[in-house]
Image (spheres, helix red, strand yellow):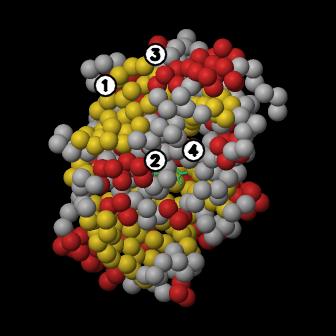
Amino acid sequence: MTQMMGIDALRTQLTGRVIDSSDFDYDSARSVWNGGIDRRPAVIARCTDPSDVAAAIAFGRERGVQISVRGGAHGSWEAAHAEGGLVIDLSDLHAVSVDPGSRRAWCSGGATIGDVDAATARHGLAVTGGTISHTGLGGLALGGGLGWLVHKAGLTVDNLLSAELVTADGRTLCVSADEHPDLFWALRGGGGNFGVVTGFEFRLHEIGPLVYLGMFFWRPEHGTEALRIGREVAASLPRNAGLVMAAGLPAPAAPFVPVAHRGTPGYGLMIVGFGSALEHHRLIAPISEALPPLFEFVTPLPYVELQKLMDQTAPWGVHAYEKGLYLQELSEDAISILSENIPRKSSPMSFTTIFSLGGAFADVGEQETAFAGSRATRFVVNVAAIAPDAELLATDRVWARSLWQALVPHASASGGYINIMADYDQDRVQAAYGPTKYRRLAAIKARYDPDNIFRMNANIKPAP
Ligand SMILES: Cc1cc2nc3c(=O)[nH]c(=O)nc-3n(C[C@H](O)[C@H](O)[C@H](O)COP(=O)(O)OP(=O)(O)OC[C@H]3O[C@@H](n4cnc5c(N)ncnc54)[C@H](O)[C@@H]3O)c2cc1C
């Protein structure tokens, strides 16, 4: 690859490192979580502060190259990673500081969920994060942010108090309900369209330090009944609890799993309690009686360990593809589609997660944030094809699309979670937000990024 002009000048402008193909660590610097994405950017600017970000944006604009923004590098849409372009890489910008008195955290734009949890848990505090600790806060929060705490504390972005943002024209803005309220609304669900967020300020909640986990696992032939039990528990899930179902998941190679069952695919139901051990016990006690599981694991554990519990299901470097949708109900039809299709996957690593939504998530008004989805939604389904190599992924990509397609007639009429779309087209992005939110986002985009500099994402086109 010929070197882009001016990279040495950029090196002198930035405090952080500037990496190109002549650097020894270019290949590791360009690698992302999804091992199937093999893009070769011309230059990677490892920004360490807003002025680095502004200089990198100016560099990209002057040369007319595509600009990608990288937080935790978990985004699964290949085209968001610029081939021959400029990557604004925030991975060196990961500090998190906590003020336990006011229960607030200041999180740098390139922090991972693990960075945030480690800093907040020291004070018995947390904000909603994802269920895999190496996911980036940046992409996760800007699209919404779902995790174990969604019933108790809402989406990650429902807890946003302010953000520091570098705009397409290089200004650093403080964005909150009082300053640039239009942008503050747009950042809460509108993705990476409006600039580069170098810092997020979140409201925190008292959590743990110990929380309570109940994990139940059934054989594939019990899928229908297992999903019905999950539906029943979700229907009356208290705010102090979180629930995730995982269909097709291989039983982990963990000490609590009998050796004979490790790696066996099946249906997992995980219920976490954030209140007392007794409350959690009452919530989970009927489950084993209703349908004796292959194994179960009930334990108190530190919140930070809960947040890493599923990390092994999605290690760096796997090949992945995903499709998501919202379900208003986990109907009998949806359950039959899931249990018929789950055994058709080929890769042992592929699985489908179903998150229960409600509680604090549903307290937020439909138009209060830009989040692409209705607050009346009860479940988010993520069909994840995950494989050790491209060949097996190609097979399970077909499986994921076909399972998703079969579920579409049962999906909520409005919205789609932009963080779990592996391929975006303009129609789908517009449909995800719905016409009212999309129009409002497009008008804000026209104000702050009229040239659509930040377009390597679930793109909102600037209103004419
Ligand atoms: C293994 C795995 C587990 C996941 N689990 C969950 C989960 O539990 N809950 C959930 O809600 N989602 C989950 N997701 C989806 C996740 O939220 C999205 O993939 C998200 O985009 C990841 O953000 P990132 O910063 O790691 O990714 P990146 O690829 O770095 O960023 C994705 C996009 O976000 C934007 N972006 C990132 N950081 C910034 C920033 N600081 N400023 C401006 N724009 C930025 C850019 O447009 C970029 O293209 C998961 C994804 C994976 C792969």
Residue located beneath label 4 in the image: 73
Compute the Cα span from label 4 to label 3: 25 Å
Q: Is mark 2 within 8 Å of ligand 1?
A: yes
Compute the Cα span from label 2 to label 4: 10 Å
Residue 126 left/right relative to 31:
left
Q: Disc 4 residue type?
A: Ala
Residue located beneath label 3 in the image: 171
Tell me residue 131's x, y (percent): 43, 56
| Cβ atoms under marks 2 and 4 closer than 8 Å | no
Nearest the eye: 25 or 415: 25
Query: In the figure, residue 292 lies in which quadrant?
Result: bottom left
Q: Which mark is residue 398?
A: none
Q: Residue at x 49, y 50 (%)?
A: 135
Q: Secondary structure at mark 1?
A: strand
Q: Disc 3 residue type?
A: Arg
Compute the Cα span from label 2 to label 1: 22 Å
Q: Is mark 4 within 8 Å of ligand 1?
A: yes
Residue 325 left/right relative to 276:
right
Compute the Cα span from label 4 to label 1: 26 Å
Q: Which mark is residue 112?
A: 2
Residue 55 left/right relative to 412:
right
| Cβ atoms under marks 4 and 3 closer than 8 Å | no
**Residue placed furthest toward the top:** 464
Residue located beneath label 1 in the image: 176
Compute the Cα span from label 1 to label 3: 16 Å
Q: Disc 1 residue type?
A: Ser
Tell me residue 157's x, y (percent): 36, 38
Q: Earlier in the sequence, mark 4 or mark 3?
A: 4
